[in-house]
Image (spheres, rainbow, N blue to C red):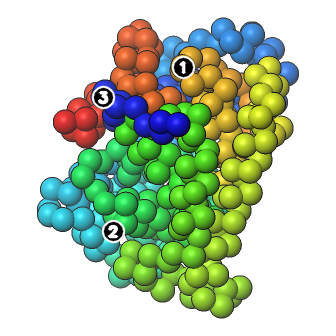
Amino acid sequence: MTLTRTPTERAATGALIGLALGDALGFPTEFNDVPGILAKCGPWREMRLPRPAIVTDDTQMTLALARGIRTATARGPLGPLRLTHPVREEFVDWYQSPENNRAPGNTCLRACNLLKDPQRDWHDASQTGSKGCGANMRVVPVGLVPGWTQEERAGAAQLQSALTHGHPTALAASDLTAHAVFLLAQGAEVTGLVGRLRSYALQQRTTYHQRWLGDLWMRTASDASPESFMARGWDECLAALDRLAAALRAPSPETDPCLATGEGWIAEEALATALHCFLLFPDEPLTALRRAACTAGDSDSIACLTGAFAGAHLGADAWPRDWEGRIEYREELLAFGTLWDA
């Protein structure tokens, strides 16, 4: 069985626009149950993009990470020190921005408040008890930057997570989310995607990226070694992938995906439920976004990741021009897409 097609044309633009569109579509439905969403929006397959199409902290932090990556890569070969400083600065700038008024997560707020102090080691700001989805909702750029090795993508994905969310499941889910985006942009067949992600998780299960994470694992009291620290996170992601595989064996498009793969407030569930929505409709990107936005869980985060997966798979032409044309931060999203598509 062929596992790849040709690489997706304009995958970076498609993924970033899709992320923002999903974010804007899910913003008004977050914190609502499905009956409430249907009462507010009508049939889910007919949901319309709001006017104006305002996004949440999910897109804002994605752009903050993208800016940090752009600064780091302009300075030379990628490495943990070169990446940490500009990403940290961008996260703090986001934290202090008056536009940071979109119901951001408490973990990001606590960590970024600590990261403000330039004398504080970032390890001391990391919230090692949190595996909220705030780390992997923003990691998509890591899967889009061309030319990085697998080790660099994994290290960058986990490091950007660790700046705020230091729980091993947050690290693993961020790594796995970036890897999914990378595979789709490279032309991976959707029918084999869950299996390839599962193989990657098993391969990485006891890999601790010391060069990128330093002594982060020692900041928890429950792990005897860096290997056991990471295994704890990867095992939770593997369990989420198993739930996803079971759901896809008996697909039920009219049923809230959260019932099978989780509500998405935590990292592994955000990944699994976003993949669930995408894989129900891999060639119908707007239907996938609408299904993701009409969920009882963290609708904007689920939908933003769904949009990123769909855009990485189908490219920039997946999205209607009238939707793309009114998305908030459109020009900056397109600029990063153009940069990485080149």
Which SS class for mark 1? Answer: loop
Q: Position of residue 94 (x, y in %)?
A: 41, 51
Q: Is residue 328 above or below residue 276?
A: above
**For the residue marked with disc 2, what is the amino acid?**
Thr
Q: Position of residue 10 (x, y in %)?
A: 30, 28
Q: Is residue 179 left or right of residue 63?
A: right
From where the camera sits, is residue 199 visible?
yes
Residue assigned mark 2: 84
Check residue 283 in the rendering and tell me which mark sits there, or answer none. 1
Q: Earlier along the polypeptide chain: callout 2 or callout 3?
A: 3
Check residue 10 in the rendering and tell me which mark sits there, or answer none. 3
Which-is-in-front pick, marks 2 and 3?
Answer: 3
Compare residues 232 and 89 and report the one nearer the observer: 232
Distance of mark 1 from mark 2, alpha carbons? 37 Å
Q: Position of residue 109 (x, y in %)?
A: 54, 59
Q: Is residue 91 left or right of residue 252?
A: left
Compare residues 303 and 64 and report the one nearer the observer: 303
From where the camera sits, is residue 134 visible?
no
* Few, some or many residues within 10 Å of mark 1 (<14, 14–19, 20+): some
Compare residues 60 and 11 and report the one nearer the observer: 11
| Extreme residue toward the front, this view | 1
The C terminus, quarter of image? top left
Q: How many marks?
A: 3
Q: Position of residue 189 (x, y in %)?
A: 50, 34
Residue positioned 71% across, 85% down in the render: 222
Q: Is residue 157 above or below residue 52?
A: below
**For the residue marked with disc 1, what is the amino acid?**
Asp
Residue positioned 72% across, 15% down in the render: 44
| Extreme residue toward the bottom, this view | 224
